[in-house]
Image (spheres, grey):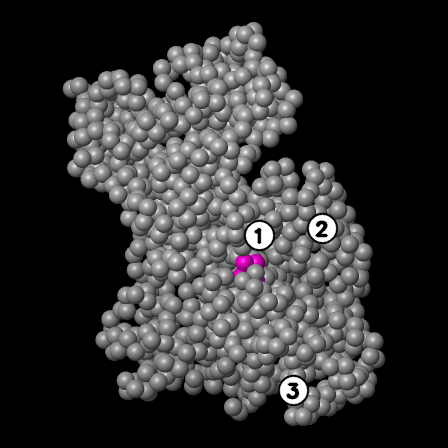
């Protein structure tokens, strides 16, 4: 290209360029950034070129390989202009169809369009896709229009106009003033005002000055600088030359990580082009200003992102930071005044010069102007690069742009600012993101890394991860950083391995504070942030690791044998019993289960199976049907576990258990086994608590429950039914040494609805109890159930069995948020229950013997503190319906007599010490629904176990309840794909025919035969063997 | 010794630029020769007029340099935060099992060299693994085998 000597020549050239562009000409733009290249973008490019040729379109359709479009997860991405149709995850094999269909025939290729995960709707145009729609792209806006290897593309979108304006129309001071007025702050993380920094460098005396682009983007999880440098290198150069002119520097450097080869390649090409065109070199655009630039590569040292370290590295030395002052603006590269800015900062400069300070300052918050690019990654649906105005809330970024957390997992935290930043929990998602706001909650915006974490991320492991990273990256020059980080890592590693004490947490905090205050450079000063922020918000996880040797996320290898066992509140050794079933040793399987719980059959029938939610097979195809396997084993149990059962000799101590639910009976079982004399007091005429009166017998047959309770009685537990305990004093007076309160949560929660006491409005939990106790219950013909949990579903299915012909469930959120288990929902639908989502009753009254209910439609609004979207009523959407009975099933509370003398919290729950389940009252322990609110059988069992351990210790015992009931396993075989015969999914389960179900309370799920059970065991990946 | 001739050319090129370019010279040699033998370092020291002690400091300070021969294929498993939260450590475990080596090691047949890297900037595709510069995204432990078996 010939040299351009003046702004006029530049505009002439641009005019000429633009005149050759036909805006209606079809253009295929293919993202060719690093992420798309990793997804075979190059093959797609080749296919497009050859296919255009083949279909005779080579001349009439333009094709561009552009920079990063940002939606990296869905790459390779194709945009078709002028319509702006977006195709995602394009493979070379799709290209022929795209060209013959879309280019030639104007028809969409449906399967390549974006699918909205919440609605399943296909979206064709970029402007309608939530990921793009909710952004505000300024800096990034030309990335998808420009081929980074063709400078003409950049010129066509207005490139180098700012350079011409700054160099030929403005004085250097005016440029600085404009940048100051715009309020631009450094995008590398520290947020120092850019204009001020330039001014320092300009005002410091010296004939030779330097400007540097810091593209040593080292924060793991951040890659916006890479994308800019790869995708729009001329914009970086343009900003740099303008800055150099303002400061009075004639030489610049671009310091790029060597891990970014495409960025190095593209920026080198751009420099060459800019030199030829006269945007670099002598007398740029006739302004008399000379400037040249060189690329230097980093050699893999995180600390070189720190400016003094970067400068030493540029000088060819090890990148060890220096104390400041003197600042680089005073004495930088080779002792000369030097100005360093981050890539994104430089790219913002032409935006300001072209559009003016006011344009820039109009976007953002009072203290932070303009936009910021974030790399939104980790456990979020739409991962990629996101540009939003400063001040956008975390919630909007994660949920509106990012589409929330995948696979219905629970959001836990978002990590911002890389190793210098912190983890922000749900309660702060409303914070706007800018330089100042996140600092208030213990994190920083940093360079823009935003890593979303869900329930499967361990926060202790995250802290350990960052300390491990920084131990490697600390340059070692100053002791507080070098040793402080190393010692923090040591403590954190001990915690993740279950080898730490509670006192270690204090030591950790002290070390963190010392490291922060005494380190030489920002690396050390900010290094403790990941530790401090996780300690601040997730101390409970630290304590769980230390006290219970439990990693709730299932990440810390030394504490986790297998994800399924780790997810089980009672810690049942799932892989081992699955193998026993596979080997046909059903009795052994039950013995293995019984090593942790006294209710294997109940759990086999009704467990909520947290284990299946964490099954690794589920990440591939479908989780192992663990509960169904357990059910199969208990249905074929030979009772051989009793051979190894051993009870301790009598201790002479007396234990009273109030309530015969799963928590109480579990505590009773273990206390009896430990040699104590145990009496259980049950207020109702039947034993079992919620297992009996909360779960219908079509799910849990009475005989199954009776058999397991009898085993408990057989080891010496006395159960007294119809025995309401009114005061604990009475029990102590009768000589009981300790008391466990497990009275459950049997009273339905009030909805606070107008007319809630209208006759015909009943509690779901009452209906279930009455039916299970054999009392007569009438619900009429039309029934509305309000709620979304298992009680709501059970009440609805029971209403069908009581003869109601029309049963509807109304739930205020959508099916995705519904807490009831999927199987229950499906079975209810099969039985003719209708589920109405996004509606709620607001008023009821009795009219003509019917319950007249006014309902209102809801929509999902903003995300609340639990990470779920809050339902909001839609105005003027009320409608009225009539029912015979309205059943409330929105939750339950506990009824604890005042005379128990216990402190109660929300929902009438008893307050206990989280570790020992001890109440403040001497000798009294409590657990189950009465302490944690309505939960599940397995959680109650787990609490019964914990209570037994604590009560035994209270009585002077060791508190050891684990037992060996199954014979040793021998050498287990690893997973063998052949054995599984390629089966990917669960074998079908036999069910009672739908037409039979509503006629009685007969069991609905009939289970498997031995062949299918064995097949299913073969699918287990045996994760526990990996850990051995 | 084609390779060494190229190395000499690189050294000569940077000798003209002076001692400040020593890191860039070493990086280019590393890319060409894939590791830095002692005699090469000595040559760099002489030609660029940088003391051997500083060269030793540089090549041990920066992670890009290798002072031992590398295998035919360089496997880099990303340990960046985004990859970490998506199970990068399990991918690394699988690669260790498959290759029989730990990060920083090269196997006896000089087939694979394994290294962990901090962030490859392909965070949206995490977990990520790079073999001989080719990025493999959305890795799972089971997929590591599929990828590695293509290398001889």
User: Residues in magenta?
Assistant: B88-92
Residue A952, above or below A24: above
Residue A903, above or below A97: above
Q: Position of residue A791 (x, y in %)?
A: 34, 30
Q: How far apart are marks 1 and 2 (CA)?
A: 23 Å
Which one is closest to the eye, mark 3 or mark 2? 2
What subunit carries mark 1? Answer: A
Q: How far apart are marks 3 and 2 (CA)?
A: 56 Å
Tag 2 residue: A490
Q: Residue at x 77, y 81 (%)?
A: B38
Q: Position of residue B146 (x, y in %)?
A: 46, 69
Which one is closest to the eye, mark 3 or mark 1? 1
What subunit carries mark 3? Answer: A
Indicate which disc, 3 or 1, sits on the residue closer to the N terminus: 3
Picture quadrant where residue A500 is located: top right
The answer to whether marks 3 and 1 mark residues whose Cβ atoms lie closer than 8 Å is no
Q: Does A378 appear in magenta?
A: no
What subunit carries mark 2? Answer: A
The residue nearer to you, when weighing A1019 against A946, is A1019
The residue nearer to you, when weighing A317 against A731, is A731
Secondary-structure class at tag 1: loop
The residue nearer to you, when weighing A122 against B83, is B83
Q: In this view, does A658 lie to the left or right of B32?
A: left
């Amino acid at each position: 290209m010939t040299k351009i000597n003046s702004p006029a020549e530049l505009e002439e050239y641009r005019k000429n360029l633009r005149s050759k562009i036909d805006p209606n000409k079809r253009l295929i733009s293919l993202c060719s950034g690093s992420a798309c290249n990793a997804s075979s973008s190059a093959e797609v490019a080749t296919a497009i070129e050859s296919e255009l040729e083949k279909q005779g379109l080579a001349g009439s359709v333009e094709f561009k390989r552009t920079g990063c479009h940002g939606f990296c997860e869905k790459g390779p991405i194709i945009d078709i202009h002028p319509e702006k149709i977006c195709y995602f995850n394009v493979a070379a094999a799709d290209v022929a169809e795209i060209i013959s269909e879309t280019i030639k025939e104007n028809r969409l290729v449906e399967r390549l369009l974006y699918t909205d995960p919440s609605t399943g709707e296909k979206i064709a145009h970029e402007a309608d896709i939530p990921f793009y729609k909710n952004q505000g792209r300024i800096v990034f806006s030309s990335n998808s229009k420009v081929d980074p290897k063709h400078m003409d593309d950049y010129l066509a979108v207005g490139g180098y106009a700012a350079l011409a304006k700054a160099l030929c129309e403005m004085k250097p001071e005016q440029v600085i003033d404009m940048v100051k007025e715009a309020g631009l702050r450094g995008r590398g993380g520290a947020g120092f005002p850019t204009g001020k920094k330039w001014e320092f460098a300009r005002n410091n005396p010296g004939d030779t000055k330097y400007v540097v682009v810091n593209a040593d983007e080292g924060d793991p999880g951040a890659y916006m600088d890479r994308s800019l440098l790869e995708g729009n290198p001329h914009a970086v150069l343009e900003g740099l030359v303008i800055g150099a002119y303002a400061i009075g520097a004639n030489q610049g450097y671009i310091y790029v990580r060597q891990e970014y080869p495409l960025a190095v390649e593209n920026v080198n090409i751009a420099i060459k082009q800019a030199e030829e065109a006269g945007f670099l070199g002598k007398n740029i655009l006739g302004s008399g200003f000379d400037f040249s630039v060189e690329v230097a590569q980093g050699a893999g040292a995180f600390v070189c992102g720190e400016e003094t370290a970067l400068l030493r590295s540029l000088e060819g030395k090890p990148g060890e930071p220096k104390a400041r002052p003197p600042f680089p603006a005073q004495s930088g590269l080779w002792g000369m005044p030097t100005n360093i800015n981050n890539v994104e900062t430089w790219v913002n400069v032409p935006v300001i010069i072209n559009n003016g300070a006011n344009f820039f300052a109009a976007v953002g918050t009072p203290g932070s102007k303009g936009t910021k690019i974030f790399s939104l990654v980790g456990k979020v649906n739409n991962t990629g690069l996101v540009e939003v105005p400063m001040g956008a809330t975390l919630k909007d970024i994660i949920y509106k742009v990012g589409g929330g957390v995948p696979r219905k997992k629970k959001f836990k935290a978002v990590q911002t600012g890389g190793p210098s930043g912190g983890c922000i929990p749900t309660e702060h998602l409303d914070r706007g993101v800018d330089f100042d706001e996140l600092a208030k909650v213990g994190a920083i915006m940093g360079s823009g890394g935003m890593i979303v974490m869900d329930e499967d991320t361990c926060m202790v492991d995250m802290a350990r991860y960052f300390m491990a990273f920084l131990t490697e990256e600390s340059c070692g020059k100053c002791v507080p950083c070098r040793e402080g980080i190393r010692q923090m890592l040591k403590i954190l590693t001990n915690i993740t391995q279950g080898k730490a004490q509670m006192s270690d947490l204090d030591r950790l905090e002290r070390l963190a504070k010392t490291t922060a205050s005494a380190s030489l450079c920002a690396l050390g000063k900010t290094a403790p942030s990941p530790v401090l922020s996780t300690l601040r918000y997730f101390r409970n996880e630290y304590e769980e690791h230390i006290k219970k040797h439990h990693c709730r996320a299932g990440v810390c290898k030394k504490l986790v044998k297998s994800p399924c066992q780790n997810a089980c509140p009672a810690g049942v050794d799932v892989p081992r019993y699955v193998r026993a079933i596979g080997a046909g040793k059903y009795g052994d399987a039950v013995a293995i289960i019984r090593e942790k719980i006294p209710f294997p059959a109940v759990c086999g029938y009704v467990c909520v199976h947290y284990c299946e939610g964490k099954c690794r097979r589920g990440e591939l195809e479908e989780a192992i049907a663990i509960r169904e396997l357990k059910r199969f084993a208990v249905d074929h149990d030979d009772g051989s576990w009793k051979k190894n059962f051993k009870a301790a000799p009598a201790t002479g101590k007396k234990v009273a258990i109030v309530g015969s639910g799963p928590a109480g009976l579990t505590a009773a079982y273990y206390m009896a086994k430990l040699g104590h004399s145990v009496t259980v007091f049950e207020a109702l005429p039947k034993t079992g608590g919620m297992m009996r009166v909360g779960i219908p017998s079509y799910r849990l047959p009475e005989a199954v429950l009776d058999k397991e309770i009898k085993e408990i009685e057989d080891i010496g537990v006395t159960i007294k039914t119809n025995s309401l305990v009114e005061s604990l004093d009475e029990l102590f007076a009768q000589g009981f040494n300790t008391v466990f309160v497990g009275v459950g949560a049997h009273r339905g929660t009030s909805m606070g609805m107008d007319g809630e006491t209208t006759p015909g409005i009943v509690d779901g939990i009452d209906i279930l109890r009455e039916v299970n106790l054999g009392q007569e219950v009438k619900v009429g013909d039309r029934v509305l159930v309000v709620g979304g949990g298992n009680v709501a579903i059970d009440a609805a299915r029971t209403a069908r069995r009581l003869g109601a012909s029309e049963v509807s469930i109304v739930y205020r959120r959508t099916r995705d948020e519904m807490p009831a288990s999927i199987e229950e929902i499906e079975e209810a639908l099969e039985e003719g229950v209708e589920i109405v989502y996004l509606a709620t009753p607001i008023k009821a009254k009795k009219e003509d013997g019917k319950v007249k209910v006014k309902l209102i439609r809801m929509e999902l609004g903003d995300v609340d503190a639990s990470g779920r979207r809050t339902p909001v009523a839609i105005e003027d959407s009320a409608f009225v319906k009539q029912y015979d009975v309205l059943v409330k099933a929105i939750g339950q509370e506990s009824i604890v007599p005042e005379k128990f003398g216990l402190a109660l919290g929300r929902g009438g729950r008893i307050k206990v010490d989280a570790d020992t389940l001890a109440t403040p009252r001497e000798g009294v322990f409590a657990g189950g629904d009465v302490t944690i609110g309505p939960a599940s059988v397995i959680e109650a069992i787990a609490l019964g176990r914990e209570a037994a351990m604590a009560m035994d210790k209270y009585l002077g015992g060791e508190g050891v309840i684990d037992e060996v009931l199954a014979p040793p396993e021998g050498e287990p075989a690893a997973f063998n794909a052949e054995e599984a015969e390629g089966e990917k999914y669960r074998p079908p389960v036999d069910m009672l025919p739908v037409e039979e179900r509503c006629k009685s309370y007969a069991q609905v799920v009939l289970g498997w035969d031995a062949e299918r059970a064995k097949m299913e065991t073969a699918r287990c990946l045996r994760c526990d063997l990996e850990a051995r | 010794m084609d390779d060494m001739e190229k190395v000499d050319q690189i050294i000569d090129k940077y000798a003209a630029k002076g001692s400040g370019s020593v890191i860039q010279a070493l990086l280019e040699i590393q890319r060409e020769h894939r590791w830095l033998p002692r005699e090469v370092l000595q040559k760099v020291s002489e030609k660029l007029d940088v003391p051997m002690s500083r060269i030793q400091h540089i090549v041990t300070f920066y992670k890009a340099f290798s002072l031992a021969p590398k295998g035919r294929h360089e496997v880099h498993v990303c340990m960046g935060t985004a990859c970490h939260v998506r199970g990068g450590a399990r991918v690394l475990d699988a690669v260790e099992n498959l290759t029989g080596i730990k990060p920083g090691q090269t196997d006896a047949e000089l087939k694979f060299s394994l290294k962990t890297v901090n962030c490859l900037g392909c965070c949206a595709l995490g977990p990520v693994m790079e073999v001989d510069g080719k990025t493999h995204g959305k890795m799972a432990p089971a997929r590591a085998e599929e990828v590695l078996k293509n290398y001889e």
